[in-house]
Image: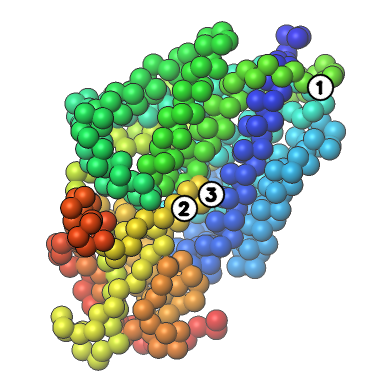
Amino acid sequence: MDWFTAPDYWLGRLLFQRSLAVIYLVAFLGAALQFRALLGERGMLPIPRFVARMPWRRSPSVFHLHYSDRFFAAWAWAGCAVSAALVAGADALLPLWGGMLLWLVPWVMYLSIVNVGQTWYSFGWESLLLEVGFLAVFLGNDEVAPPIVVLFLLRWVLFRVEFGAGLIKMRGDECWRKLTCLDHHHETQPMPGPLSWFFHRLPKPLHRVEVAANHVTQLVVPFLLFTPQPVATAAASLMVLTQLWLVLSGNFSWLNWITIALALSAVDLGSGAPDAPGAPLWYEIVVLAMTALVLWLSYHPVRNMVSRRQVMNRSFDPLHLVNTYGAFGSVSRVRYEVVVEGTADEVPREDAGWLEYEFRGKPGDPRRWPRQFAPYHLRLDWLMWFAALSPAYAHPWFGGLVERLLENDRDTLRLLRRSPFPADAPPRFVRARLFRYRYTTWRELRATGACWERTYVREFMPPTRLAVPAVRDR
């Protein structure tokens, strides 16, 4: 091994790259299938309106130059095609510089989407995908063994993801310090999975063990990533196991999967590169220059991480090159859900024929068991969880959602599991009500078949109708 490369990590790099390409594919697929209702020309938060008021230097994106729904669709589907090519290993068929350019393409394309995505793309894993995707550009292909400094930077990202999340928990909510947060979290998390009910019903002493193990994995184990092998591999493997536990317990988009991919890059599988030549000088210069840039940009994320006023999931540059991460600095003790209903009656009385809209992922019908969607990201469902926490989260977009439901907007209805109204007969009124949801007990589940029990809390939005029915050229 020369000073610049680490041949023993050739297989780890391969697993990391293919995993990252799959995540890119899922991300672009979600953008292609969901953008019209969320961000399109007639969406809830239209991109043209955003780019008209946002300078390019603050949100660099190709859509500042041109936007149409057709162009966005072509952009997102092209991102899917490039990602699929990377999954198939197309970068290995190109010269080193060509492979780097191929990895640069999805990064540029997804950056353009995230920087105009507004509230719908305000999640930490968007920045995490961009930061990791940028580093992947410099990881090389079969023409060169993995560069040591890039492997180090990937561990640096993994360290900040885990350690930052651990710190925000210890600083944010006393239930993490008392080891009681998981008495509530499996029930109140944004989007439960099919096994979340069973995780919630685990004995409370086991919940204490879960929290304690989480603290060890996030506050102690990350430091071991920078120790010699095999300790670093053991630390990364423990992180993989922890993330798989989280995958089973809920739907967290691709956060867990990209963390697993990062951990795989730190695993020494003892498989050297197949006769990889030494790195060319130009490649060493480019990689070292990138490393210096990343280390320089790490100042603000590190300062935030050690600060008592630590914030979660913030980007410090418009290219999302180095970011700060964290999750669940506070845990809700009670679950609330916004239930959206419509009626075709002329007068929206309480006893009118109100029918409920069903979302794909968020809880609705108490008898409907949660599904597994991650790593796919249901953006509207996630924002509905935030809306239930506070109407302030819903202010920019909820009125637009209601308007589109009143119009039976085809693209909006495609985001839902089911609309109770036929396509040619939209509701006259739509309202929203806030309910408290709790998991049923074992006895209640056997008796009723319902995994949720819900109780009406208050009105979230009064019955609303269109002042003048809109006509859309759908």
Give the amino acid type for the residue marked by disc 3 in the picture: Val
Colour scheme shown:
rainbow
Location of the C terminus (image quadrant) = bottom right
Left or right placement of residue 43 versus residue 329 in this view: right
Instruction: Say which residue label 3 marks.
Output: 114
Alpha-carbon distance for marks 2 and 3?
21 Å
Q: Residue at x 22, y 35 (%)?
A: 203
Foreground disc of the pair 1, 3: 1
Left or right placement of residue 112 versus residue 235 in this view: right
Q: Residue at x 17, y 68 (%)?
A: 459
Where 393 sits versus 195, above or below?
below
Instruction: Depth check: give the residue in front, 260 or 472.
Output: 260
Instruction: Depth check: give the residue in front, 358 or 321.
Output: 358
Q: Residues within 10 Å of mark 1 (few under 14, many from 20)?
A: few
Q: Position of residue 246 (x, y in %)?
A: 40, 37
The dot on residue 274 is 1
Instruction: Say which residue label 2 marks.
Output: 373
Give the amino acid type for the residue marked by disc 2 in the picture: Phe
Mark 3 or mark 2, which is nearer the start of the sequence? Answer: 3
